[in-house]
Amino acid sequence: MSFNLFEAIVDESKLHPYFKQIQNDPAYAQARQIINDWSEGLLDRSGEATKFIKEFQITFNSSFWELYLNKAFKSLGYDIDYSKASPDFNLMGKNNKRISVEAVTSNPSSVLPIKLSASKIDEEEYLSDSTLKLAGKIRDKHQLYLGDGKKKHPYSSLEHVKGNPFVLAIAPFDKQLAQSQNNTAINRVLYGLEPPTNYHQPQKCIEYIVNKNGEDVNIGIFTNDSYKEISAVIFSTTGAFGKAVALAGTASFVKVTRLRKIGIVEFMAKEGLDKLGRFRTQVSKTYDIFSERMFSGLEVCGHDVYVYGGGDHKETHLDGLQIYHNPYAVHPLSVYDLDAPEIVHYFYNVENKSMDIIYNDNAMISRNTFTAIA
């Protein structure tokens, strides 16, 4: 059965500002069609279609994230058992592999669009606020898995969940420019690692941060067994509306960061020693690449930041997807369970108290789109 998510079924006064902005603007016509296509199967649950569409039109963010994930899991080759209402996604793969996934977003305190101050954003406050929101959402879902007395059937009690890797899929929608946090906040929440100062020094480890009430909030939850029931966390800052705009190819301007990993022989042949460190490549007046390169064992690693017109940008649905593995998981998630060339996998090294990364060259980890509206 076909549904149009953008045909309003609630009173206009209840429509989310983002939904209203997207609903009728001709610049977003292709993006709207892409989003509708993501819903395939998700609205087939008995009695759920109207409920989901209302939620999408009124609150927007959490429903949008579910739409993105629905398409992502299918792209990864999984069937989804829509007959089960909880958790959000019950994945069925080859060899009867089953994975239970609960989706969650960190949301703004107000549904109104946030106006950015003309003054410079306080980066420390911004990171702290993002960290606290993500930590709180993961804590709440962990309690629902175990049973907090509020949910009649905790996730752990469900027969179709028992024995499966239990994965949280989380995305930050808590403020404008939330995608700009990259992975700095989630690194703190899961592995207790502060943003790196440079490539030659280990990241500083922290165990807690202080909230606005002056209380200590534990972070680094995957550095011990306190969250052993959560096998992994799927994370993305690129699964928001910008994904549909990027896939539609209608963005006016794009900024994207991709990780680089090049063999030394290939690096010497294609780039050369003079490309170690930081440098800028101006492809055209509207196309710049800001790069960083350094030796890492038998490879040269770093990143490229592309700043260019939307017509030069290409990405897939899975680009920007990141998976954090819990070394203490009762039911571990294998790197092969949710794997594609675009996905970046993170692991916590218990002995070294550091983060290990598995990724392919050119893996995208952040992307911002900007669309000119007439």
Image (spheres, grey):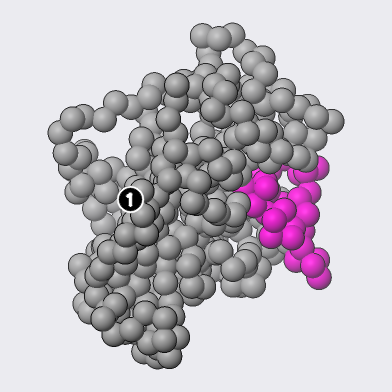
Which quarter of the rendering shows the N terminus? top right
Q: Can residue 177 be seen from the camera position used here?
A: yes
Q: Is residue 53 above or below residue 8?
A: below
Element carrying mark 1: loop
* Residue 118, above or below 261: above
Residue 81 x, y percent position in the rendering: 78, 49
Q: Amino acid at mark 1?
A: Lys
Q: Residue at x 71, y 25 (%)?
A: 4
On the image, the x and y values in percent for residue 351 come to 36, 83
Quarter-wise, where is residue 292 in the image?
bottom left
| Residue at 53% from the left image edge and 38% from the top image edge | 250
Q: Pinpoint residue 67: horizontal percent, then vertical percent.
A: 63, 40
- Of residue 270 and residue 136, the one placed in the foreground of this image is 270
On whether residue 251 falls in the magenta region, the answer is no
Q: Is residue 21 left or right of residue 41?
A: left
Q: Which residues are magenta?
A: 69-97
Quarter occupied by residue 272: bottom left
For this view, does 73 lie left or right of residue 278?
right
The residue lying furthest to the left in this view is 119
- Residue tagged 1: 285
Question: Can I make out residue 172 in this image?
Answer: no
Q: Quadrant of the C terminus?
A: top left
Q: Nearer the viewer, residue 296 or 355?
A: 296
Relative to 266, say whether 329 is above or below: above
Q: Is residue 82 magenta?
A: yes
- Residue 312 x, y percent position in the rendering: 49, 51
